[in-house]
Image (cartoon, helix red, strand yellow):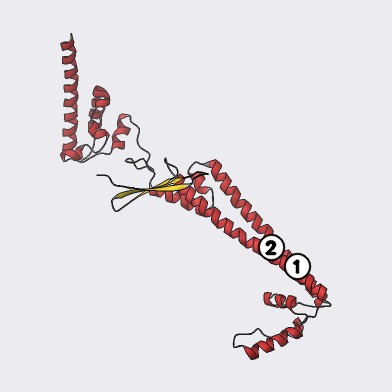
Amino acid sequence: MTNARNRNRNKHHLGGLLVAALVLVAGAASAGLDRASLRLLRAESELMGAAASRTWQYGRTFDQIGGEGIERDQVQDEVGGSGGDPGQDTASGSVSTGTKVTAGALSAILPGAGQFYNGEKKKAYIMAGIEVAIWTTWFVFDNQADNATSDARDYAHIFAGAGGTDENHYWRAVGRYTDSDTYNEDLARQRRSSTDPVPNDIPSAQSWQWVNTSRQVDYLKQMDDADSATSRRDFMIVFAIVNRLVSVVDAVLGAGGKPGSLEGEAMGMDLELEMLPSWRDPGARFVVSRSF
């Protein structure tokens, strides 16, 4: 009984090998894979099961015997297998550089867009929300700075008669000097003692004179408030830049099947940068490897 089973198993193996040989010969003789060859491959797969022709399953078949090869994904699609993701490197499973570049570019344009591209919608909404909050705050501070500056200049016009120009250095001088004559005298001294460029004298149409020192001090306080609002507005630009950088790096590292890592190849070696996020001990790991 055992001998009979062995003979049957040998017959099946022999039949499978014969079919495989026919497939290889057909591939070597033809310039490409035609429908007849694919039917033979399907028959071989059905006959031998998981043991069928591992050569064509994991690489190019006919290159080994001098014929024109076929891609694994092409054969698997024809015989009912599942093809690989075109965005992935089939050897390592890592996402192509193009995918990471796309994710990073989207986040550079709009923080959160790269995360949305990667399928991380919750993170995308958070980063986009931060961006909206940053620019909303910028406009609020900008409006405060404009209003404070306008109020201070109106105050100087009422209590010192200043006005007639929007030049910033003029309004600074209004706060530093009691009247325009004193300012012009100081300019004359600077011209005599220095070779550096000196602003022009204040014309009579733009002259000023504070009614008292107390009003001048109040004006200086208003100008300080305007300067503070302007500084807060400008500082929001820094937050916007930081948010973009964080979004770009996160989008690049999060692209693909291995989030938190950035892979590439240089001089025949595989390079991998892996972030190690941790509240207690954050860090990163850089791995250089080469396959032989």
Which sits in the foreground, 41 or 281? 281
Disc 2: CA contacts within 10 A as few (<14), some (14-19) or many (>=20): many
Q: In the image, residue 178 lies at what x, y percent?
A: 78, 80
Q: Pick the quarter of the image with the C terminus.
A: top left
Q: Gap in Å between the C-alphas at discs 1 and 2?
A: 11 Å
Q: Amino acid at mark 2?
A: Ala
On the question of residue 154 being in view, the answer is: no
The circle drawn on residue 66 is none
Residue lying at 73% horizontally and 64% vertically, measured from the top left: 147
Which sits in the foreground, 4 or 292? 292
Q: Amino acid at mark 1?
A: Gln
Q: In the image, residue 55 lies at what x, y percent?
A: 23, 34
Q: How many marks?
A: 2
In the displayed structure, 210 sits above or below 238; it is below
For the view shown, which residue lies furthest in the right direction? Answer: 211
**Residue tagged by mark 2?**
229
For the view shown, which residue lies furthest in the bottom direction? Answer: 192
Q: In the image, residue 210 lies at what x, y percent?
A: 81, 78
In the displayed structure, 147 sits above or below 114; it is below
Q: Pick the quarter of the image with the N terminus.
A: top left
Image quarter for residue 177?
bottom right
Where disc 1 sits, the SS reads helix
Q: Is residue 183 left or right of residue 247?
A: right
For the view shown, which residue lies furthest in the front direction? Answer: 280
Q: Is residue 9 left or right of residue 77?
A: left
On the question of residue 234 being in view, the answer is: yes
**Residue tagged by mark 1?**
222
Q: Is residue 222 left or right of residue 21?
A: right
Q: In the image, residue 22 lies at what x, y percent?
A: 17, 29
